[in-house]
Amino acid sequence: MTKKTFTLICFVCLGTLVAVASSSHRSANTLAEVSALNVTIQEWAVPTKGAHPHDPAVGADGALWFTEQMVNKIGRLDPKTGEFKEYPLATDKNSGPHGLVADKDGNIWFTANFGGYIGKLDPKTGKVTEYKMPVAKADDPHTAVFDARGILWFTVQGGNMVGRLDPKTGKIELKEVPTESALPYGIQINSKGVPIFCELGTNKMASIDPQTMAIKEYPLPEGVRPRRLAIAADDTVYFTDFKSGHLGRLNTSTGSVKLFDSPDGAEANPYGIAITPDGMVWYSESGVHPNTIVQFNPKTQAFASAKIPSGGGVVRNMAATSDGRVYIACSGVDKVGVVTPAK
């Protein structure tokens, strides 16, 4: 990650603090009515201290995979046994593994945020294949997701790009985002195969045409800073407004946007988000202590929340399993966990 990239990210985070400190210049959120969330949250300490677990993912075998950004490792947890296994990356550098996702063959793909490459880990052998960014500006690949054709799409935050990688050929193509310093962040694929991504550096969401790579931006209300997103079965996009304390909803067909005040208000810093098979929207509030796990019911527009036992220390992302559980990575306390709804 370059000095310029780091400065841009710090600027966004500083903007959040300024917005909180200057709340008199804008109307504060009205706290949402919220009920107690009936879940069990089980956490495990990551073996390597200072790992800073960042993004969780569901493996082909149902395991909880996660990046260990500050110690240059990829981790795996078997939630049934509590057994960990860690896979070290190249020893001559800290690759800064950030986002990750599993393919259908069981390989684990990750973005090397500090190393400027996309990595593929073969868990059977521990071998890591590196796909370097084709231009120096794309120094910090950020978040990745596979489409139905097996193409890996990813954001390049400081480089202000979105890219795609064809695993069959290793070819990488990049497209610059129209808005300067947009900080492309979270990315997901809708049912039509269209990647949708957040622009954390500005008040916009965007989509990229999977054929032409043309980018279309969707304006959001002033002051909103979308960080992560999840897409419902009907292609409704839900996103976390990290700066102003909202859960957002975007209809990409009409461009209409609705904001819901997060339970803990303007300082909640909503962050990681996922949607379980029952349609429930789950996300984290990283600006409160302890961090909370929030569930939003799109049908009733009701909120429920639960505190994370360890405090979370910033839950940066989460992943939904096929059986309705949610995997979380608690970076500040070096733990990963599983959120299980009551039956």
Image (cartoon, rainbow, N blue to C red):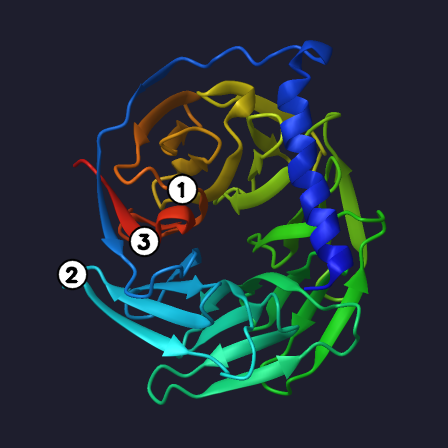
Residue at point 40%, 37% (across, down): 282
Residue situated in front as seen by the camera: 98 or 260: 98
| Type of amino acid at the residue the image marks with label 3 | Val
Q: Could you tell me how far apart the alpha carbons at marks 1 and 3 are, in whole angstroms?
A: 11 Å
Mark earlier in primary sequence (1, 3): 1
Q: Identify the mark at residue 336; answer none if there is no mark.
A: 3
Three-letter residue code for mark 2: Lys
Which label lies toward us, 1 or 3?
1
Q: Which mark is residue 80?
A: 2
Q: Quadrant of the N terminus?
A: bottom right
Q: Residues within 10 Å of mark 3 (few under 14, many from 20)?
A: many
Q: Position of residue 196 (x, y in %)?
A: 64, 50
Identify the mark nearer the N-term, 2 or 1: 2
Kindly indicate whether the residue at mark 3 contacts the one at mark 2 (C-beta within 8 angstroms): no
Question: What residue is shown with label 1?
Answer: 313
Q: Earlier in the sequence, mark 2 or mark 3?
A: 2
- SS for dot 2: loop
Write down the quadrant of residue 94 in the picture.
bottom right
